[in-house]
Amino acid sequence: MPNYRRPFRPRRPARGLRRLDRLPPGVRKPLIRLRRAHGLMEQGKFKQAGAIFDDLATGAENRGLPRASQLKLQAGRCWLLAGKTEQGLDRLKDGLGLMVAYGQTDRLDTVSQRILGDLKGNGFEEEAKQLEVSIRDLLSKAQQSGVSTRTQKSLPILPSICPKCGASIHPEEVEWINNWQAICDYCGSILQAKG
Ligand SMILES: [Zn+2]
C-alpha cells in the first residue's frame, strides 16, 4: 500500500478546530490560550486551565468585554475541580455577577441552573447551597430591574464545540444574533447553525 502522506504536513488542530494562522496576532494569541485552556480541562489539568481562564477573564474584564463572565465561570469550574473550592466559588459568584453587570440577565437563570446541576453532580452539595443563595439574590435584583428570563423555544442546532476556540457550546445559553447564527461566549466568533 503506497503512502500518500506528504512529509511536511502541518499539524492539524484537534477535533475539527479551525487553523488560526491567518488571524492577526492580537486575536490569535488569546484564542490560542483559550484553546489550550479548554484542552487542559479535557485532560483533567484543572489547575493549569483555571490559571489561564483567570488570566483571560481579568483581561476581558479590564477591556469591558462581555465574555469576561463566561471566562470567570469556567475558571470557577476549573478551580472547584482542582480542589480549590473557595477560589472556585468566588469565581462562580463573580462570573454570575458579571452576567448581571453586562446585561446578560436573560440567560442568568439557565446558566445558574446548569452550574448548580454541575456542582451537585460533582459532589459539591455544600458549595451549591452557598451559590444558590447568591443566585437568588442576583435573580431577584435582575427581576426588580424589570428583566424577564428568556422563554424557552426550540433552537436550531449549533456545533457542539466552537470551531475557533474549542469551547463547549450550550445552545440555550449563547446569544443569538438571528435565527441561524449565535455568538461564542468565549471568543466572540460567530457560530453557524446546521440546516
Ligand atoms: Zn469560541
Image (cartoon, rainbow, N blue to C red):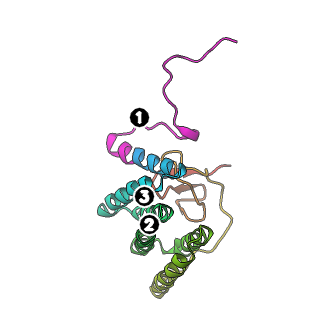
C-alpha separation, residue under disc 1 versus residue under disc 3: 25 Å
Q: Amino acid at mark 3?
A: Gly
> What element does badge 3 sit on?
helix
- Magenta: main secondary structure: loop
Q: Which residue is more in the foreground, 60 or 39?
A: 39
Q: Residue at x 53, y 48 (%)?
A: 43
For mark 2, does the 10 Å Cα neighbourhood hold few (<14), some (14 to 19), or many (20 or more) residues?
some
> What element does badge 2 sit on?
loop
Q: Which residue is mark 1?
A: 21
Q: On residue 84, which mark appears?
A: 2
Q: Amino acid at mark 1?
A: Asp
Image quadrant holding the N terminus, namely top right
Residue 26 lies in the magenta-colored region:
yes
Q: Which residue is mark 3?
A: 50
User: Closer to the camera: disc 1 or disc 3?
Assistant: 3
Percent from the top left, x then y, of residue 63? Answer: 30, 60
Percent from the top left, x then y, of residue 26? Answer: 32, 45
For mark 3, does the 10 Å Cα neighbourhood hold few (<14), some (14 to 19), or many (20 or more) residues?
many
Residue 20 lies in the magenta-colored region:
yes
User: Closer to the camera: disc 2 or disc 3?
Assistant: 2
Q: Quadrant of residue 24?
A: top left
